[in-house]
Amino acid sequence: MDHVLNIADNYIFTPYVYPTSWPEDGALRQIISLWVMTNLGAVLIYLSFGTLSFYYVFDHKLMVHPLFIRNQIRKEIQLAAVSIFWMSFPTVAFFFWEIQGNSKLYDNISKSSLGWPGVFLSIAGFLFFTDMCIYWIHRSMHHKNIYKHLHKQHHIFKIPTPFASHAFHPVDGFLQSLPYHVYPFIFPLHKAVYLSLFVFVNIWTISIHDGDYRIPGPLICLINGAAHHVDHHLFFNYNYGQYFTLWDRLGGSYRYPSALLGKGPHDHIRKLMAEAAHTQ
Ligand SMILES: [Zn+2]
Ligand SMILES: [Zn+2]
């Protein structure tokens, strides 16, 4: 985040926002700047990619499903907005700790002992580590003593739209984002890769809520897509994973997507319409 902060300081904060008497390396100034950038960045990614996905990927026919609730999109966006706001406080604590130089982030390939192969290895490591951690965090969110207090808010939406992607109780949302923040404090990671992965995971989260249940055949058993995740929203104790089906398989919670068996939300709508046409 130090590069992003430097760019924001150079072009916006120093010339237009802060008084010249407030130095760029002042801790309070850095925390305020990080907080503003975190909120703006998260809202921008959520609304822009969420809106694009809603209009160009999400099948609007799903909105007539009987489990699609009244004013659902407004409720999803409201919950996400509140969540992003509260989540930004602990998130900024991580970013601040990171810009103080406490992480293993590096900005020059020559600083990686493995060079370019190390960069690709770190991408694989990041995806593996965060997928594993999110699986167990998400699964523990379904424990009966925790679920009703935190995670239930995300499961109000049985037929989610892309806007449900960030609609969590703030504590739930932060706990599920924790692996992303922890990773660069444990493992080396290139700064540009970290930023790219940060944007990627947000887009991925939107994509598993986008109602596009198609997935290339060979990937069905490997990748946790929207078809897998809608079954999580509908049947709760299956498909807790984020990118891969690996931990669901190891943890005994894998469910082959019902949308790919002709028993998904679209099939249910078609059945209801056929029944309605038949009774007319
Ligand atoms: Zn869940
Ligand atoms: Zn979800």
Image (cartoon, rainbow, N blue to C red):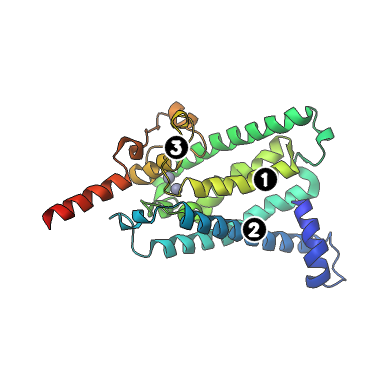
Give the answer, above or below, for where 243 lies relative to 49.
above
Q: CA distance from mark 1 to mark 3?
A: 24 Å
Rendered location of residue 129, percent (x, y): 60, 34
Q: Is residue 181 visible?
A: no
Q: Quadrant of ligand 1?
A: top left
Between disc 1 and disc 3, whose residue precedes?
Answer: 1
Circle 2: residue type? Gly
Q: Which residue is mark 3?
A: 215
Q: Which residue is mark 1?
A: 196
> What quarter of the picture does the C terminus occupy?
bottom left
Circle 1: residue type? Ser
Circle 3: residue type? Ile
Q: Is residue 190 left or right of residue 132?
A: right
Q: Which residue is mark 2?
A: 41
Viewer-proximal residue among 143 and 243: 243
Between disc 2 and disc 3, whose residue precedes?
Answer: 2
Q: CA distance from mark 2 to mark 1?
A: 13 Å
Q: Is mark 1 within 8 Å of ligand 2?
A: no
Viewer-proximal residue among 213 and 16: 213
Residue found 73% across the figure and 53% down from its top: 96
Asked whether disc 2 touches disc 3, contact meaning CB atoms under 8 Å apart, the reply is: no
